[in-house]
Image (cartoon, rainbow, N blue to C red):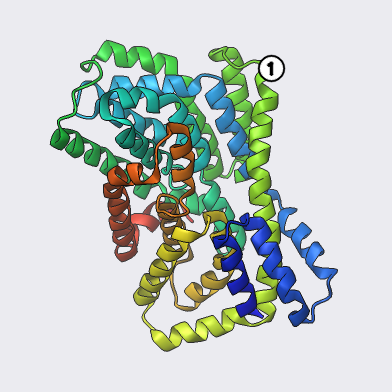
Amino acid sequence: MSTIILVTFLLAALLGMPLAFALGFSALLALPFSGVDLNMLPQRMMHSVNAFPLMAIPLFMLAGELMVRGGLVERLIGLANAIIGRVAGGLAQVAMLAGAGMASVSGAAVADASALATMLVRELSKIYGVGFSAAIVAAAANLAPIIPPSNAMIVYAYMAGSSVSVAGLFMAGVVPGVLLTLGMMAIVWVMAKWRGYPLSGEPLSGARIRRELRRSWVILLMPVIVIGGIVAGAFTATEGAAVAVVYALVAGMLVTRKLRLKDLPDSLLQAAITSAIVGALIAFASAVTFLITIDLLPARLASAIRDITSDPMMFNILVAALLFVVGMFLESNAAYIMLVPLFHPIAISYGLDPLHFGFLFVFNLVLGMLTPPVGVVLFVVCSIANVTMGQIMRHLWPFIAFGFGLLFLCMYWPPLVTGLPRALGY
């Protein structure tokens, strides 16, 4: 039965069927072989999405939409421009810092890719050309699932169960997220020097930085309140997401005064569409996961892996190799929902730290969002910037290579990931 599910799902996905329907189709095809009462699947599907933690995903997405429409992102870009100054690859460096800033609020790479591409690609293209500009935006947007709050980490923690804390995973992403941002900024500087791109931006000015800080304090305070409140235990991740929505709404209407009541329906619609896609994936995947579980696939998979190796590090490497391939063909949310229930218990049986393994799992699939042929961030940026995937990949590969290098560094040196959450008691 598990073989039928996996083969039909992969074939349906490769033939272009939407992933939620591909999951549902594979479950229905395998159902006659399972002996399961048909009434159980709708119940499990409803139970899987009727979860308080999952409410954080649409709320964080809505907060990101309100930030864009309220002019908060424009102020964030202005602050980044003032901090960077006149250096090699200056405007591209600004895009990286803006991506990190948006990541600290939205948690969704697709939403950030759409916002950054719409606002920055045209200006970047005047200096660097459209291919390099699109690559910069894609790399910057992909920081969102690493830097907290991260919708990907929320989904992972939900699928992994009580052994993984959402707040702990958030903190696990802080140090690698900072290193990833700084490393990609260094790559931009080297590429700008190597290719002879002209300088952009204005010379550093203390007065200008202070002016931009006064304009941007409302944005800088937002992640402090939201993430700080979650880590301090003042509220849950879902409640923190609701706080982020209210904060973005008040800031956009009363501080920047660019957000209007007429903007709210479109913001709600965009957040609802993206959330509905995630919800459908979770619902259909829960049915598939249930069928796979009663077919004892997790136990058989664990036994097969133990026959290959008993070394926890080798297990990590095998999972990383598998996720690299999976990330090339499967949308990341579907991969979390399908694979976390399979591999997380096996990782625990190997004695691996749940937080460490969880972060590596997320980071690996996040990098898959930049790898063709099914890199969802690539699709968004390519459509907005009107470039081909070949054009963007010629400039994007150094950032992907650095990401995988950092992934293996995190794998071989766990304190890089677990040091901060352990210091905070997670």
Residue 146 visible: yes
Tell me: 415 left or right of 338: left
Q: Closer to the camera, 90 or 407?
A: 90
Tell me: 226 left or right of 319: right
Q: Residues within 10 Å of mark 1 (few under 14, many from 20)?
A: few
Q: Secondary structure at mark 1?
A: helix
Identity of the residue furthest to the bottom in this view: 307
- Above or below, comparing residue 380 to residue 157 in the picture: above
> What residue is drawn where x is 24% and y is 37%?
188
Q: Quadrant of residue 131?
A: top left
- In which quadrant will I find the N terminus? bottom right
Residue 104 visible: no
Percent x, y for residue 15? 57, 60
Numbered circles on residues, count: 1
- Above or below, comparing residue 99 to residue 336 in the picture: above
- Above or below, comparing residue 329 to residue 202 in the picture: below
Tell me: 248 left or right of 418: right
Say what amino acid the circle numbered 1 marks. Leu
Percent x, y for residue 332? 52, 55
Percent x, y for residue 124? 33, 26
Percent x, y for residue 85? 24, 21
Q: Closer to the camera, 187 or 102?
A: 187
> What residue is drawn where x is 71% and y is 67%?
287
Q: Quadrant of residue 127?
A: top left
Q: Closer to the camera, 120 or 261?
A: 120
Residue ID for mark 1:
261
